Amino acid sequence: MSTASPSTTLPQELALITSVLELMKQEQQLLVSADTAGLGELTPRKAQLVVEMTALGQERYQRLAAAGFAADDSGMQAWIDGGGDAQALSSWQALLDVTREAKELNRINGMLINKQLSHTQSLINAMRTPTSGGEAAVYGPRGQAATAGPSKRYVVG
């Protein structure tokens, strides 16, 4: 029984990571414009592609292990160095290049998300905290409108 080559999944993996990279570029634009609705639509698509990529990567690792190599990226490089064909080398290098690009874009998008979170937290804190001792906070810690303090209504009677 012949085992399939560890390079069999590379074209599919490259297509998927390229699609993820394109979605990440869109994600960056949505983050910059604070388009939460667009992010809500994009995120599930990106997550599904990542699931598919993970499955293909695991399949490649299983094939590497069956061929006697480490079931990881270093095993793939060793397999290629040990006699993988030129097409496998080209596909592997392309996959690594696009993956590096996606990791960098993910890092940048993460920074944008942290910046938005920090900005949002600052706004929330500003609404909770009075600017001077005599002013009441706009909102309480649970998001409810803060009360103005004790009532100054008098009971006549």
Image: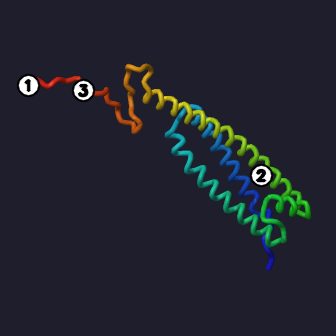
Q: Disc 1 to disc 3, how far (Cα)?
A: 17 Å
The x and y percentages for residue 88 are 84, 59
Q: Secondary structure at mark 2?
A: helix
Amino acid type of the residue that numbered disc 2 sits on in the rendered structure: Leu
Nearest to the observer: residue 29 or residue 86: 29
Q: Nearer the viewer, mark 1 or mark 3?
A: 1
Earlier along the polypeptide chain: callout 1 or callout 2? 2
Give the x, y percent position of residue 113.
59, 38
Using the rendered view, name the quadrant where residue 60 is placed: bottom right
- Nearer the observer: mark 1 or 2; the answer is 1
Q: Secondary structure at mark 1?
A: loop
Give percent across and percent down for residue 73.
80, 58
In terms of depth relative to the viewer, which is nearer, 126 or 155? 155
Disc 1 crowd rating (10 Å Cα; few below 14, some 14-19, many 20+) is few
- Residue receiving disc 2: 95
- Drawn side of residue 55 relative to residue 7, left or right: left
> Which numbered circle lies on residue 157?
1
In the visual, does 83 lie left or right of 54? right
Give the labeled residue for mark 3.
Answer: 151
Position of 29 relative to 100 (above/below): above
* Residue at 88% from the left image edge and 57% from the top image edge: 86
Left or right: 1 in relation to 56: right
How many C-alpha atoms fall within 10 Å of the one at disc 2: few (<14), some, or many (≥20)?
Answer: many
| Residue 91, x across and y down, in percent | 81, 54
Between tags 2 and 3, which lies in front? Answer: 3
Tell which residue pokes out farthest to the front in this image.
157
Task: In the rendered view, tell whether residue 70 sits above or below residue 13.
Answer: below
